[in-house]
Amino acid sequence: MIDAYEDPGTPDSRSGGRYLWWLVARQPWRCAAGATFGSVWMVLLAATPYLMSRAIDDGLEPGDMDALALWSGALFTVGAFNSWLSIMRHRTMTRVRMDANFRTVKVVVGQAVRLGAWLPRQMGAGEVVTIGVGDVQTISQSLTVVGPGVGAVVAYLAVAVLLLSVSPLIATVVLLGIPVIVLLVGPLLGRLQGSETEYRERQGVLTARIGDLAGGLRVLAGLGGKTLVADAFRRDSQRLREQGYRVGAVTSWVQALGIGLPTLFLAVVTWLAARLAAQGDITVGQLVSVYGYVAVLVGPVSFWVECGYQISRGLVCARRVVRFLRLEPMPDTGTRDAPSEPSALYDPESGVRVRPGCLTALVAEHPADAVAVVDRLGRYTPSDATWGGTRLEDIALDQIRNRILVADHESDLFAGTLQDVVGPAFGGAGQCRSAAPPRGTTSHHEPADATPHDMAPPKALLQALHTAAAEDIVQALPHGLNTHMSAQARNLSGGQRQRIRLARALLAAPEILLTVEPTSALDAHTEATVADRLRDARHGRTTVVTTTSPLVLDRTDTVHYLVDGKVAASGSHHELLDTTPGYRALVARDNEEAVR
């Protein structure tokens, strides 16, 4: 079975079927063992009626007790051996399914990391969660076909040969009847794929809605929008339930026919064999064996139907995984080196120029315009932005990520101790957004100076917490930095989470720090403290903040005022207040609120 640190290999993402075959090809010997165990197990099940018929014809009917004991002993031996085979078959197939499960999880997680900030731009979080929670399990279950599925075919052929020795007529009926049963179920499997596909898509949408609700419940409550959103969620849930009923209806028919048709067929063949026995064409022992053979065939046929059902669902889920694996991140075509010295960033689309070593603010009538500028300067969207006169797209992406960090006030916070969340998150500057939703999240890399939790935290960590005015957060927690944080640190308030995110970005100590609304959730006193400390901590290094807070703007070197995404005015905060009415009207509102 695949090791947690083993390379899962390169998946075949040409189609859902090819992906399933790739999962089989990655463990050929285990799949071959499962097919062997399953085949021998089912063939020996078919051998049981044969041994029973010999015990009746050679021992019981003529009264030969030695023959009866011989065949009875053989029957017991075969049964015991088959029990062991059944155990080995089940263990082997469990390993096959687990390998497929873990391997799919690894390729999906690896793809998510590879896509990084481009992932949420191309696929919703709900669909990714659905793949990881539901589709992976369904795909692994579909690999059952390589064990009992192959065994069912072998057992079917073995029983056909045995029936030929009893009656060619019965053998012909069985050989023709079983495929007819499988064909009758076939159309339902095609219909199941269509229903299952729509169900999975709706499930992904609803999962995303659940995530949105969990993240924004407090805001919704404050705005009085809980009822409205709850009604929308209820409607989506009802539609998903109705689609689930349609999937269940098809599934129930597949499963019912998978059991019912073979049983009905068993009755027909038994009636035919009984007539032949009454006419003297076959013996009583052969009649018993025919009944046993056909009864044994109920298992393989049921396996065929079940495998068809599992493969049908597996193909639906594999197609979703393949569609995810086909997504491509922003192409890295850069071959040039980044500037060797601190240099200016320039965005020609907006006209924003960020001088090296300065604290620059972006103020926009529409906050999305400022965020768009940050995205271009951080090379998260295609643009003609330059760094030291060189287009960012011409510079090797890893150099940009190592020196330019984009930190969003909504970037992800992973579960773990507070020190894990803030401290060991970086192996170097710029990693904050390399595997994240747009505008900030972290990737966990252990830095060389990380310390165990039972030792004093690094000085750099304490300094970052101080700059972000987050010491009171640590002091208020029951175990300080060792206090466990839930996913997204939901056990903290919004302002506390914002300061923790800022501390994490500061600890990375990037050459260029681009922050989006780093103080928007803070009260005026804390905001002023953070602004002062941020200016001092980042002195001599390039820092950009998007904000409309006069408390922050008053401490910046340069302010760019954006109107419709273009620079309308640039200068110091006080210069723009005196010369630009639109800027004054925009930030005066914040000033009045601060005074209150």
Image: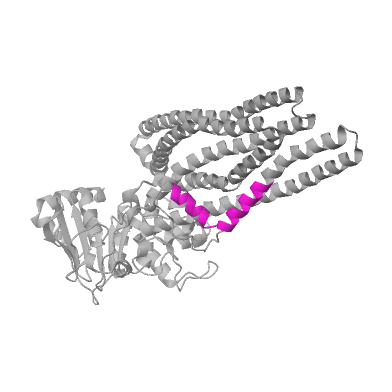
Measured along the vertical axis of the image, is residue 8 above or below residue 366? below
Q: Position of residue 486 (x, y in %)?
A: 48, 52
* Pick the front one: 403 or 33: 33
Asked which quadrant contains residue 320, the reply is top left
Measured along the vertical axis of the image, is residue 224 above or below residue 90? above
Q: Position of residue 385 (x, y in %)?
A: 19, 63
Q: Is residue 381 left or right of residue 10?
A: left
Asked which quadrant contains residue 260, the reply is top right
| Residue found 55% across the figure and 40% down from its top | 307
Q: Residue furthest left?
A: 579
Q: Is residue 225 visible?
A: yes
| Residue found 48% across the figure and 40% down from its top | 313
| Residue found 37% across the figure and 34% down from its top | 229
Q: Is residue 468 visible?
A: no
- Classified by dominant secondary structure, the portion drawn in magenta counts as helix
Is residue 31 located in the magenta-colored stretch of the structure? Answer: yes
Please state, as top left, top right, bottom left or bottom right, where the N terminus lies in the image. Answer: bottom right
Q: Position of residue 356 (x, y in %)?
A: 21, 71
Q: Across the whole image, how many numbered discs are drawn on residues?
A: 0
Asked which quadrant contains residue 258, the reply is top right
Measured along the vertical axis of the image, is residue 30 above or below residue 205? below
Q: Position of residue 404 (x, y in %)?
A: 29, 66
**Which color scheme is applied?**
one colour
Is residue 585 located in the magenta-colored stretch of the structure? Answer: no
Q: Is residue 566 left or right of residue 13?
A: left
Measured along the vertical axis of the image, is residue 6 above or below residue 146? below
Q: Is residue 397 left or right of residue 447?
A: left
**Extent of the magenta region:** 17-40
* Pick the front one: 467 or 282: 282
* Pick the front one: 520 or 20: 20
Q: Is residue 546 left or right of residue 144?
A: left
* Pick the front one: 314 or 172: 172
